[in-house]
Image (spheres, rainbow, N blue to C red):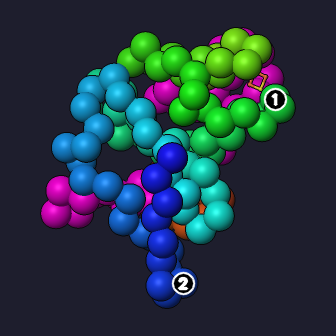
Amino acid sequence: MQAVSSTTKQAFVEVCAVEDLWMGEMESFEVASHEVLILNVDGELQAFDGICPHQSVSLVEGRFDGKVLTCRAHEWSFDACTGEGINPKAECLRRFALRIEGGKVFVSTDPSEEQGETA
Ligand code: FES
């Protein structure tokens, strides 16, 4: 996991360049004390809580086949586009808002901010 620091309290912090994550790749970043997992799903970047809601295992240690993210510990799986649980269906990953500016990827420091909305 790469640590990303922010010297001032702000809504979004830069985590990487767009070209750092190729289609089908994932990487995790520490953003304001949250582990955030960014996945490239068919060329679209998605950001979710990087910790498995089951027993808090880091999801970047799991598998990502380009569509489905699977936790290494007990095989819980999630839709990489939506974060919705596939198995079990009742679970869902928290989404972090993400935006791209000048080829750089910025992630919200607040997981409650949805879908790139900015204040
Ligand atoms: S900790 Fe992820 S499935 Fe159990």
How many marks overall?
Answer: 2
Q: Which mark is residue 13?
A: none
**Residue at the spot of label 1:** 54
Residue 68: x and y, percent? Answer: 51, 17
Residue 113: x and y, percent? Answer: 58, 61
Name the element at disc 2. Answer: loop
For residue 106, above or below residue 43: below
Distance between the alpha carbons at the discs numbered 2 and 1? 30 Å
Is residue 6 found inside the magenta-colored segment of the image?
A: no
Q: Is residue 114 visible?
A: no
Q: Which stretch did the figure color magenta?
A: 80-107
Q: Which mark is residue 9?
A: 2
Q: Amino acid at mark 2?
A: Lys
Residue at image x 81%, y 29%?
54
* Disc 1 C-beta below 8 A from ligand 1: yes
Residue 93: x and y, percent? Answer: 66, 37
For residue 71, above or below residue 18: above
Residue 117 shown left or right of residue 35 in the figure = left
User: Could you classify mark 2 by the number of other residues whose Cα lies within 10 Å: few (under 14), some (14-19), or many (20 or more)?
Assistant: few
Q: Is residue 64 visible?
A: yes
Q: Indicate the quadrant where residue 62 lies.
A: top right
Residue at image x 54%, y 62%?
31
For residue 62, above or below residue 113: above
Q: Amino acid at mark 1?
A: His
Residue at image x 35%, y 28%?
25
Residue at image x 49%, y 87%?
8
